Amino acid sequence: MAAFGSRAADPVRFVEKDWMNERFIAGVQAAVPPGLITEAGSSMLTSKGPLHWCSSEQGTRWALTMNGAVESGDRIAANIIELIK
Ligand SMILES: Cc1cc2nc3c(=O)[nH]c(=O)nc-3n(C[C@H](O)[C@H](O)[C@H](O)COP(=O)(O)OP(=O)(O)OC[C@H]3O[C@@H](n4cnc5c(N)ncnc54)[C@H](O)[C@@H]3O)c2cc1C
């Protein structure tokens, strides 16, 4: 209410969902098995020739979240722009 005003007290619609019950999602965050970041983390951050990896998993801060995905996208796009200058 403080942020959005009195109209926020009268929502048009409310949706609640238990993502754990979604057969193909079964949770919230992306799943990375134990040991993967330790074993392969550095190669996930390194481009391979013309291939540049970019995703939430490559986020150097807040990996596996939207913030990580956006940070990764910004960083990889800047790298590619530098390469093709
Ligand atoms: C239920 C749920 C709730 C979440 N809640 C939050 C939250 O509250 N806050 C938060 O920060 N994060 C949340 N996350 C995590 C966040 O959504 C992800 O970390 C983020 O969306 C990943 O972004 P991405 O760009 O790496 O991958 P994605 O968003 O998965 O994008 C990958 C894209 O590639 C496309 N694609 C795949 N294969 C191919 C192909 N062969 N060719 C072409 N396109 C292809 C897919 O269709 C998709 O559009 C949640 C995730 C889930 C599943």
Image: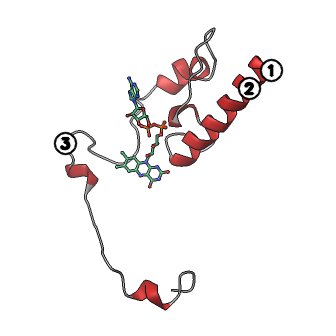
Q: Amino acid at mark 2?
A: Ile
**Residue beneath label 1, please?**
85
Residue holding disc 2: 81
Are there few (<14), some (14-19), or many (20+) residues within 10 Å of tag 1? few
Front residue of 28/69: it is: 69
The kind of residue on which mark 3 rests is Arg
> Residues at badges 1 and 2 in contact (C-beta under 8 Å)?
yes
* Mark 3 or mark 2, whichever is nearer to me: 2
N-term mark: 3 or 1: 3
Colour convention of the picture: secondary structure
Extreme front residue here? Answer: 85
Does the numbered disc 1 mark a residue whose Cβ is under 8 Å from ligand 1? no
Residues at discs 3 and 1 in contact (Cβ within 8 Å) = no
Position of 49 with respect to 16 (left or right) is right
Which residue in the protein does label 3 denote?
23
**Residue 49 placement (x, y as % from top left):** 63, 8
Element on which disc 2 rests: helix
Q: Is residue 64 above or below residue 35?
A: below
Say what secondary structure mark 3 lies in: loop
* Residue 14 vertical position relative to residue 85 in the rendered view, above or below: below
Determine the CA span between mark 3 and mark 2. 39 Å
Residue 32's disc is none
- Per the model, the C-alpha gap separating discs 1 and 2 is 6 Å
Percent across and percent down for residue 54 are 56, 29
